[in-house]
Image: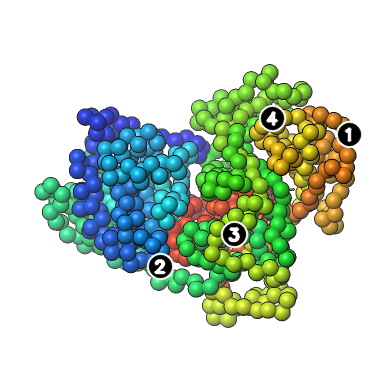
Amino acid sequence: MFENPFLVSHQEIKWKNKKPFSKVFNDRYFQDSALEEIENVFIEPNSLREKFKSQKFTLVGELGFGLGISFLYTLKVFKEHNKKSLNYLDFVSVEKFLPTVKQIRKAASLFPELEEISQIFLKHYHPIHNGIIKIHLAEFNAALTIINADIQDAFKLIQHNFGKFDAWFLDGFDPKQNPEMWTSKVIENINKCSKNNATFGTYTSSGLLKKSLNENQIGYQKVSGFKKRHKLVGSLNSKDDISNTPLPRKIAVIGSGIAAAGVVHAFTKLRISCDVFEKNSHLHSGASGNHAAAMYPKFQFNNSAMNRFLVQSYFFAYQQMLQFSESFYPSKARFFGMNERTAKWIERVGANDSFPLFKEVAQNSASIQGGVLAQTDFLKGAYLEPRKLTERIFKNSPSKIHFNHDLISIKHNSNLATLSFANGKSYEYDAVILAIGSGLQQWIEGLQVSKGHIIGIPKKYVRKISQPIHHQGYILPPLNDYIWMGSTYEHEYRDLEISSKQIYKILNAQKMFLKSDEIPDEEILVRASERVSRSNKFPIAAKISQNHCLYAVGALGSRGFSSSFLCGEVVANQIRGGFIPVDDEVLENLEV
Ligand SMILES: Cc1cc2nc3c(=O)[nH]c(=O)nc-3n(C[C@H](O)[C@H](O)[C@H](O)COP(=O)(O)OP(=O)(O)OC[C@H]3O[C@@H](n4cnc5c(N)ncnc54)[C@H](O)[C@@H]3O)c2cc1C
Ligand SMILES: C[S@@+](CC[C@H](N)C(=O)[O-])C[C@H]1O[C@@H](n2cnc3c(N)ncnc32)[C@H](O)[C@@H]1O
């Protein structure tokens, strides 16, 4: 396992006659006629053309992402067979060494057929962290998940995904150079991961692989493969098959904040629509209705489940939000160390080679008054307009929002949930997701709710802010001529009335950025709302009633915009029986 999520090992390649050759495994990545071989060894034995045409979802697994050529070619075949974009490809690949963008570009350039696809893919591919990386490819109705881990660890991370795969590409290097990719344990795990009768293809018919298949009682045929080589193909006999999980016909999402939007967005990608119910007559009534928000990339130095979640969810959200460019603004983000603890953190990220996205900032470059002990810029920071973002997510989806629907009870009979609303209406659903912010307290014990203020000041009263600054709270670049700053934490409060004391608390924390001590109260915009968290500090993304199809997403704390997208992805895939892109320990922590 890695020491922290940012330690990324890349492929080590020698280019011999323009062809890639692994320095580590002393073998070539693919044959000269690689695409024909992929067709012959992986696409055809797995009947992928038929599956792509007839199945709504296909989950393909690969051992050895390498330089992504098999993936890119599969994507091309999928695109050709999914003309109406009704079906969905989930491609999951295990790889110890992440290729760089440059390495993929150079390898893909050997195949003119892949040029267009690889260009689109590379726009989305940023190998920033290790662990599980999911990249959604809206252009193809497909997603790639790389499990960046050694094969010995990879399956231990994803046991909750056993029984789901339709097809496998077994593509390690030559078994003589790379025996650990072909062991009996690996084959046992592939079998467990798969649906019953899932298929596999491999270019080798080595004794080691045959022994591993025999030890797991997996039938195979040795057939002539590409260029007179022999290949093994066969079908698996998993007992963990969950393919009979029915896809819910009707899904309800309760709430319309960022937690609900994260779920709806995950379903939209799968071409599944939901009914959304909001108790108020409009969007933006809860904490997600703030006018501005920051992405908060304060990561830790360890490889704890929490840090893996923070890093993975941050970059997943980042990739998802890039498509909503009119509400999401990538920029650097600056951290000021105003106390010993943060200054120490800044010094550590600056001095640590495994945090290349943090760049130390010379002290004198700050145009502020004293008190700053250390500073650093994070190169992939961002800020956003939550109102616009949630509006766009709902607008982009086939889901419909029903306002003035305050959920008051849920009754279960057999597999159906009957939802009753305060307006007297009731409806039946196969799956229900509660994304109701502080309303979750009614359903889940042990949640902590705090009140927070955020304020907007006309920019004429504030020094120039060109990137989000994090120190005691945050201060953001201007949006519609206002500079937003926040936020406060009150654990004991009666209602959501605006409090002058809290406004002055924020102004005081940000005073080094103010041009004037006298800002007229009536020119300050203020909003107070509730944030929800729980003692393990993880959000909730889980089934909350074992016998019924009732799920919750929430407790997003003060980083709701970073975590909601991955939480939505987790729950949507739990409901549809798809690949859940987080590791077992993270998943356990997201449960209630
Ligand atoms: C002051 C402040 C500043 C913040 N700043 C940031 C930031 O900069 N960056 C960041 O990432 N996070 C920030 N957060 C946290 C973030 O705003 C929250 O984590 C997030 O908005 C929570 O989203 P949610 O969808 O769970 O809840 P909400 O946004 O509260 O949405 C819940 C929705 O459910 C509806 N609802 C409730 N009960 C029912 C019912 N019974 N029936 C139907 N509908 C119902 C509500 O009306 C509401 O629309 C901040 C929070 C606060 C308080
Ligand atoms: C033949 S290459 C795969 C080629 C790839 N499918 C492509 O299209 O470019 C084999 C891959 O297996 C990876 N690999 C080898 N041993 C591994 C291990 N122990 N754990 C995870 N990946 C491993 C290598 O890093 C290499 O990228």
Q: Which residue was labeled with disc 2?
A: 242
Residue 67 drawn at (x, y percent): 33, 40
Label whose residue precedes the other's in the sequence (4 or 3): 4
Residue 63 drawn at (x, y percent): 32, 48
Q: Residue at x 28, y 64 (%)?
A: 50
Residue 74 drawn at (x, y percent): 31, 52
The quadrant where ligand 1 appears is bottom right
Label whose residue precedes the other's in the sequence (3 or 1): 3
| Number of marks drawn | 4
From the viewer's side, name the closer residue of 152 and 590: 590
- Spatial CA span between label 2 and label 4: 50 Å
CB under 8 Å between discs 3 and 2: no
Q: Which residue was labeled with disc 1?
A: 518
Q: Which residue was labeled with disc 3?
A: 394
Type of the residue with mark 2: Ile
- Spatial CA span between label 3 and label 1: 40 Å
Q: Which residue was labeled with disc 4?
A: 336
Type of the residue with mark 4: Phe
Type of the residue with mark 3: Phe
